[in-house]
Image (tube, rainbow, N blue to C red):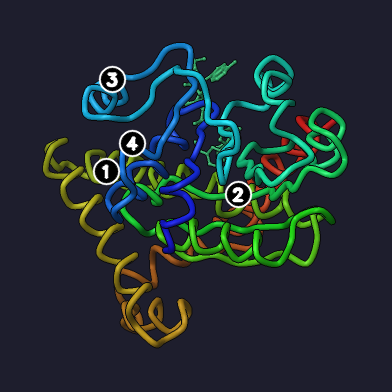
Amino acid sequence: MDLADLGRRGLVLLGCGKMGSAMLEGWLGRGLALSAVWVTDPRPSDWLKSLAARGLHLNEALPDEPAVVLVAVKPQMMSEALPGLAALGEGRVLFLTVAAGTPISYYERTLGAATPVIRAMPNTPAAVGRGITALVGNAAASEAQMALAEDLLSAVGQVVRLEGEHQMDAVTAVSGSGPAYVFHLIEALAAAGEAEGLPADLAMTLARATVTGAGELAHRAPESASQLRVNVTSPGGTTAAALGVLMDPESGLPPLLRRAVKAAADRGRELGR
Ligand SMILES: NC(=O)C1=CN([C@@H]2O[C@H](COP(=O)(O)OP(=O)(O)OC[C@H]3O[C@@H](n4cnc5c(N)ncnc54)[C@H](OP(=O)(O)O)[C@@H]3O)[C@@H](O)[C@H]2O)C=CC1
Ligand SMILES: O=C(O)[C@@H]1CCC=N1
C-alpha cells in the first residue's frame, strides 16, 4: 500500500465501530501512522481512546483536504452523519463508503454530484489481513482514485472490482455478511458435538479448529472446494452419511443458504430505499 499520500493528507473515518475498527487495525498493522488518522465517532471504544493517547486524532477538527474519508456508519445513521462532511465534497477528497444498502446516488445528492465516491463492501476478516472487498466507483472517481482504494483495501485482504452497483446487494449477502454465517457454523457444529455427548469446551475447540483449518486449507490448496470435500468423504463412511443430510436438495444446506442469502440481499435493497 502506498501510504505516502494518506500520510501527508490524512485518512478520516466517519464512524469507527466493528467494521471501521477491523479495517483500521489492518492498516495500522501495515504501517499507517496514527498521526495520519482522524476518527469521528460519538462513543469511541477503549481501543480508539488508547490509540488517541498515542497520536490518533479522535473527534478533533478534520484536515481541510484529507486523501480519503472512509464512511463506516450504519446506513440508518447516514442522514445524521454525512451532511456534516458536505464541505469536503466536489473536490479532491475521495469518499470511500462501506455502508450496506446506501446507493452512490445518496452520496452524490448529499455531497454534490462531482464528489468522487467509491462504494465498497469489505468484511471483518480485514482485521487479520484476510478480508475481501468488492468495489464500484461513480463517474467522478478517477482511475487513480479507484487504484488508491484498491491499494488501501488490498492491505487488508483481496479486492475485486464489480461490473456495476447492481451487484452490490448480492455481494453484501455473500461476503459482507458471510463471516457471520461461518461463525454460526462453528456454534452449530459445537452444539451438535455436545448433543453427541462431548463436553462443551471440547466440542467448541474441535469445531473452531475444524472450521479455521478447513478455511486455511481452502485458501492454500489448489483443488476446488468440491474436490476438497470429496477428499474427506470415504465411500460408505461417516462423512457420506452427514453429507446425505447436508446436501439434500430439499432440506439441506443449499436451499437454506439460498434463503439466508436472499434475505440478506433483500434487506440490503430495503436499506437502500
Ligand atoms: N460489521 C460488518 O461486518 C460489516 C459492516 N459493514 C458496514 O459498515 C458500517 C458500520 O457497521 P458496523 O461497524 O458493523 O456498525 P457499528 O455500529 O459497530 O459502527 C458504526 C459506528 O458509527 C458510530 N456512529 C453513530 N453515529 C455517528 C455519527 N453521527 N458520526 C460518526 N459516527 C457515528 C457508531 O457509534 P454508536 O455505536 O455510539 O452508535 C459506531 O461506533 C455499516 O454501514 C455496515 O453496513 C460493511 C461490511 C461488513
Ligand atoms: O449486517 C450488516 O448490515 C452489515 C453489512 C454486511 C455485514 N454487516
Name the spot of residue 156 as percent of width and height, x first: 40, 56
Inspect the image, locate mark 1, and give the three-letter code of the amino acid beneath it. Answer: Ala
Dot placed on the residue nearer the N-terminal end, 2 or 4: 4
Nearer to us: label 3 or label 2: 3
The kind of secondary structure element at disc 3 is helix
Q: Is mark 2 within 8 Å of ligand 1?
A: yes
Quarter of the picture containing the N terminus is bottom left
**Residue 123 picture location, percent across and down:** 49, 48
Q: What residue sits 79% from the left and 39% below the top?
A: 90
The residues tagged by marks 1 and 2 sit, at their Cα atoms, a distance apart of 30 Å
| Dot 4 or dot 3, earlier in sequence | 4
Mark 1 vs mark 3: in front: 3
Report helix, strand or loop for mark 2.
strand
Q: CA distance from mark 2 to mark 4?
A: 26 Å
**Residue behind mark 2:** 121
Name the mark on residue 93.
none
Residue at left 66%, top 38%? Answer: 100
Split into 4 quadrants, where in the image is the C terminus?
top right
Give the number of marks: 4
What is the three-letter code of the residue carrying label 4?
Answer: Ser
Q: Are marks 1 and 3 in contact (CB under 8 Å)?
A: no
Instruction: Work out whether 64 lies above or below 163.
Output: above
Q: Label 2: few (<14), some or many (≥20) within 10 Å?
A: many
Task: Name the residue that disc number 4 marks.
Answer: 35
Residue underneath mark 3: 49
Cβ of disc 1 within 8 Å of ligand 1?
Answer: no
Amino acid identity at mark 2: Met
Mark 1 and mark 3: Cα distance apart in space: 35 Å
> Of marks 1 and 2, which one's residue comes earlier in the chain?
2
| Number of the front mark, 4 or 1 | 4
Q: Residue at x 13, y 37 (%)?
A: 201
The residue labelled by disc 1 is: 190
